[in-house]
């Protein structure tokens, strides 16, 4: 039976995993829409701003909503001159401190500073229909809040896993999923 730290981490990581898998499909949609834009423009001399904007929206969603998934799977950039030589417990300490000192404060700062910006966009129901673009730009701007929330959830999962390693309940702090 899994320790409560691992169970809690698994629950939190489920959010990152599911959102990441879902948003990955946007890359295929992005390619297909971009292909359509190019064909329409160069083969038929026909274009629509909303199609071009939709590619930008999907691109933003892939990066903003996929950040926590990337963090979960350790796909972020890491300069590990010394890190890889550390014991699993020392790596857990380094990662725990990095999460507490960098990830959580930056995510909270992004939430704090982005809140009014996104709220103002929602208040005016901002859109770009007047220029032929997409409605509901406020939904796109909401990604500025969704990303730090997802990063905070993944950060909490990582804290639990690092604590499990430090306490000797796990040998590595990788994803909480069994077999990964």
Image: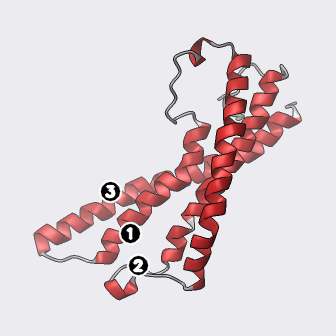
Relative to 103, 143 lies left or right: left
Relative to 87, 34 lies left or right: left
For the point 81% across and 27% down, the residue is 164
* Callout 2 secondary element: loop
Which image quarter is the C terminus in? top right
Q: How far apart are labels 3 and 2 at the CA level?
A: 18 Å
Corner quadrant of residue 98: top right
Coloration mode: secondary structure
Q: How far apart are labels 1 and 3 at the CA level?
A: 11 Å
Tell which circle, 2 or 1, labels the residue nearer the N-terminal end: 1
Badge 1 crowding class, 10 Å Cα cut-off, few under 14, some 14 to 19, many 20 or more, is some
Which residue position holds label 3?
31
For the point 41% across and 58% down, the residue is 59
Which residue position holds label 2?
134
Percent from the top left, x then y, of residue 110? 61, 56
For the point 64% across and 68% down, the residue is 115
* Callout 1 secondary element: helix
Badge 3 crowding class, 10 Å Cα cut-off, few under 14, some 14 to 19, many 20 or more, is few
Which is nearer the eye, 134 or 81? 81
Relative to 148, 129 lies left or right: left
Which residue position holds label 1?
54
Tell which circle, 3 or 2, labels the residue nearer the N-terminal end: 3
**Is the residue under label 1 in contact with that under label 2 (CB below 8 Å)?**
yes
Relative to 169, 28 lies left or right: left
Percent from the top left, x then y, of residue 114? 60, 64
Tell which circle, 1 or 3, labels the residue nearer the N-terminal end: 3
Percent from the top left, x then y, of residue 133? 36, 79
For the point 72% across and 38% down, the residue is 100
- Asked whether residue 70 appears in the rendered view, the answer is yes
Examine the rendered structure and indicate whether residue 123 appears above or below residue 74.
below
Q: How far apart are labels 2 and 1 at the CA level?
A: 7 Å
């Amino acid at each position: 039976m899994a320790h409560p730290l691992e169970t809690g981490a698994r629950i939190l990581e489920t959010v990152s995993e599911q959102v990441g898998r879902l948003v990955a499909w946007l890359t295929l949609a992005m390619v297909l829409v971009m292909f359509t834009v190019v064909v329409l423009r160069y083969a038929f001399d026909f274009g629509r701003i909303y199609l071009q904007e939709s590619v930008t929206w999907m691109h933003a969603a892939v990066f903003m909503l996929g950040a926590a998934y990337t963090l979960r799977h350790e796909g972020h950039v890491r300069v590990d001159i010394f890190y890889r030589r550390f014991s699993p417990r020392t790596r857990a300490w380094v990662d725990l401190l990095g999460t507490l000192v960098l990830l959580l404060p930056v995510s909270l700062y992004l939430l704090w500073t982005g809140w009014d910006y996104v709220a103002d966009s929602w208040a005016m129901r901002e859109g770009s229909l007047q220029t032929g673009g997409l409605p509901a730009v406020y939904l796109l701007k909401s990604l500025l809040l969704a990303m730090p929330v997802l990063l905070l959830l993944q950060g909490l999962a990582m804290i639990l896993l690092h604590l499990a390693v430090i306490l000797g309940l796990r040998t590595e702090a990788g994803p909480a999923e069994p077999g990964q």
